[in-house]
Image (cartoon, grey):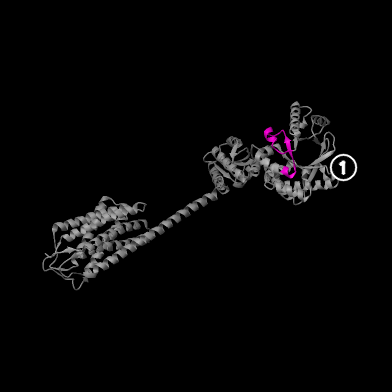
Amino acid sequence: MLASSYNPLLVLLSLFVAILASYTALDMAGRVVTAQGRAALWWLIGGASAMGLGIWSMHFVGMLALNLPIPVGYDVGITLASLAIGIGASTFALWLVSRRELPWPRLVGGALLMGAGVAGMHYTDMTALRMNPGIQYNPGRFGVSIVIAVLASGVALWIAFRLRRQSRRVRALRAGSAVVMGVAIVGMHYTGMSAAAFPLGSVCGAAHTGASADWLALVIIIVTLAVLAIALIISVLDLRMEARTALLANSLAAANKELAYLALHDNLTKLSNRVLLEDRLTQAIRTAEREKHRFALMFMDLDGFKAVNDVYGHHVGDLLLIDVAQRIGARVRQQDTVARVGGDEFVVLAYVDDPEDAGTLANALLEVVREPFMAGGHELRVSTSIGIAIYPGDGGNQHDLLTNADAAMYHAKGLGRNAYSFFEPSMNADVHQQLQLVQDLRRAVERHELVLHYQPKFNAPNGPIMGVEALVRWQHPQRGLVPADEFIPLAEKTGLIVPLGAWVLDEACRQMAQWQREGHSGWSVAVNLSALQFGHAALIDSVRDTLARHALDPRSLTLEITESTAMRDVDASLQILQRLDAMGVRISIDDFGTGYSSLLYLKRLPASELKIDRGFVRDLAHDTEDAAIVSAIVALGQTLNLRIVAEGVETAEQQAFLTRLGCHSLQGYLLGRPMTAESLSAAMA
């Protein structure tokens, strides 16, 4: 037999190629599985070609590592046939591991077919030498090489199937598995090579007509490594692009989900918005009509929310709305719908069996909203007014139900707020009238329909006049003179009280400046501030600019705020009042005795005057409790060095009693009714 030896460098290169080919095979298996449509087919073709070339190259380089003492060459046609066998076996392997399942019978069958293909590729390569006489094989070693080929194929298929899904650890596992597979493939190859024996005098028939072994190894290694590297680079780039595409798709899906949520929910409270409410209402109408059921639609509006918003700021107001939404949601059933349809307006769609159930739920909602809230470090108290419309009696469609529930809510507010009311047909006329009044009020300032009446304030007991209180009236073109108690609540609810109050302040200061120029230098004018005005950010600048515009001494202006407004947020009120006091403006605490102030806070306020509420004065001569309260207020004012003004004086007995107690000023119909500036000037002439 011819003596043979192996080139160690080529042996190592064949092992490296086997490991790289194994890793490429594992990676291609993952790409075929994750790809879809035509992309999967192209990955199967490309991956099988790269994998087959790698395995074939390993075998061929291993054969080139064999040194024989005769010239050696390789038949090109047979060599290409062996390459085709390798690519075919690789195609089968990638197709098999890309299946959804790989049961043991299929794995065994696949191992036998792929093992036969790998062995066939190897021994076909050996025939490309065209040895004469032919190569003699050791039957035992030949059989062992076939067994190794089948076992290596089975292990390779099982590993490829297990590691075909992408994960964080899969690349490291693939690298370790590629080493095991590469060693197995090399073991099969060199076992098969050891089974071959070349008789003495053998001649290689392809030595002169086939490809030369001198340069073939280098070309095959370079080409194979390039192909495998390109395949892996393309795989990595495609995987990254796929990951980015998946990330983008997930981001778009999340964005679409978020947009869909935002389109149907209120961004602040996370409740349903008007769009989702209308959809739920449509479904409720269809279901109720089909199954002959009833449901209730409740329209809720918070009482006192605008004052909270203006006094404490929108941030605290938003926190309050969130808490209110949570309380409402906790009181209704899961199948009911709670929606926020406006600033402080909520709607509850509740499935009820009869109106009594709706009344029970409304009572529960009134109770939870009435309980104190903690928002932004402040204890807040609001209430709610609820209007209830029942389907089908109070409306057969969305619009009618919402309109009628809204009308019932306004009726509940008219009852004194913190109440609920069922819809009645007569309510619509009242609501339309009220809405029209709001629209007219918006234009009243522009059309100069507002007028000021002035009620004189007298030094006790009979004068002289020491000042006036400005009282706004509305000279409506159709309704005539509208009293303040009819339109001021509307102005406060709609926020119109701020521009209306600014006009009152400006007109009162203008008129007082004119009276002082006419010789009434000792007079002052008192202007009432609502809670919204008092908490408005522009109040200080508005007062300062108005005084400057009319060149009026700040001491001639008294701003009256109610005791409840002053005590709502003592620290904030103190800052505002101190800035007004520093300006020279006088402060009067109006309706004193009706609120919840304490001496601790009252003495901190820079007020110069206490005004006794007319409710205590009205029954002064007949109610000993009212007399005791008034006496206490006067004594308190004297202790704090405050002027005491009593309003609502209508009888001589009241006048005498208040003077005797020590009131400094009196105001009421007994002494002088509210009148226009012209009438007051004429009366004083």
Residue 164 in sight from this viewpoint: no
Q: Position of residue 408 (x, y in %)?
A: 65, 41
- Residue at 53% x, 44% y is 287
Q: Nearer the viewer, residue 416 or 146?
A: 146
Task: Give the position of the N terminus as an image quadrant.
Answer: bottom left
Residue 677 vs residue 47: left or right? right
Specify start and end residues of the magenta stretch as a single range: 580-607
Q: Residue furthest top?
A: 624
Considering only vertical position in the picture, is 76 above or below 120?
Answer: below
- Residue at 80% x, 35% y is 666
Considering only vertical position in the picture, is 562 above or below 236?
Answer: above
Q: Which residue is label 1 attached to?
A: 684
Image-quadrant location for residue 111: bottom left
Which amino acid type is marked by label 1? Met
Q: Position of residue 476 (x, y in %)?
A: 77, 47
Residue 524 in sight from this viewpoint: yes
Image-quadrant location for residue 240: bottom left
Q: Secondary structure at mark 1?
A: helix
Q: Position of residue 187 (x, y in %)?
A: 21, 57
Residue 411 vs residue 255: left or right? right
Q: Position of residue 32 (x, y in %)?
A: 34, 58
Image-quadrant location for residue 29: bottom left
Q: Nearer the viewer, residue 537 or 30?
A: 537
- For the image, the number of numbered tags is 1
